[in-house]
Image (tube, grey):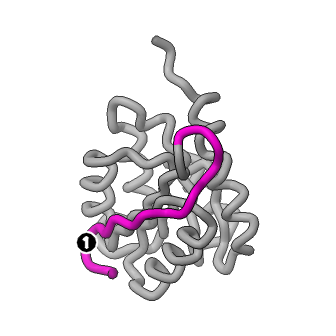
Amino acid sequence: MGHGTEASSGAAGPAGGGPVSVLVVDDNEDTRVTLGMVLELEGFAVRLARDAPTALEAVAAARPDAVVLDIGMPGMDGWELARRLRELAPGGSRLLLVALSGYGRSADRERSEAAGIDVHFHKPVEPDLLVQVLAAARKFAARRQEPA
């Protein structure tokens, strides 16, 4: 694990439509792989990406329900990744974007909101809290449905 995008099968997830799919984007391999394993144990279908360009390819290939992303990545940071994910059509606006970052100042949270990130967690985050937020990804998407 840890190179490019890896697909993983999650355990049985929430009722209706199989497990919630989550893309984890972090340049730190230990963080990326560990978070992926924790989410799989919680029943999510998890894919991993080591950087923003790989994440953009992964979302274009198989749109997840949610993306958990680091902010402080080399090259394209998480804020720019979030802006680009929001621009993807169709459905970029329906992705649940969750920042999991060492950047925790109020200015960082404001930047996350401006970039289109829905939830900004400062590391370390309580796993149960992250799981609760991600489990609601499909309800979140339904509320953000774009007009037909």
Residue 54 drawn above or below residue 74: above
| Residues drawn in magenta | 1-17
Residue that protrudes farthest toward the bottom in the picture: 30
Residue 106 drawn above or below residue 4: above
Residue 39 drawn above or below residue 57: below
- Residue at the spot x=26%, y=78% of the render? 3
Name the spot of residue 86 as percent of width and height, x first: 42, 40
- Residue at the spot x=54%, y=25% of the render? 145
> Which element is circle 1 on?
loop
State the predominant SS element of the stretch in magenta: loop
Q: Does the magenta stretch include residue 14?
A: yes
Image check: 95 left or right of 50?
A: right
Q: Is residue 132 magenta?
A: no
Please give the residue where the numbered disc 1 appears in the rendered image: 4
Name the spot of residue 65 as percent of width and height, x first: 50, 46
Image check: 88 left or right of 41?
A: left
Name the spot of residue 88 as percent of width and height, x first: 33, 38
Residue 147 drawn above or below residue 91: above
Q: In which quarter of the image is the N terminus?
A: bottom left
- Residue at the spot x=33%, y=80% of the render? 2
Residue type of the residue flagged with mark 1: Gly
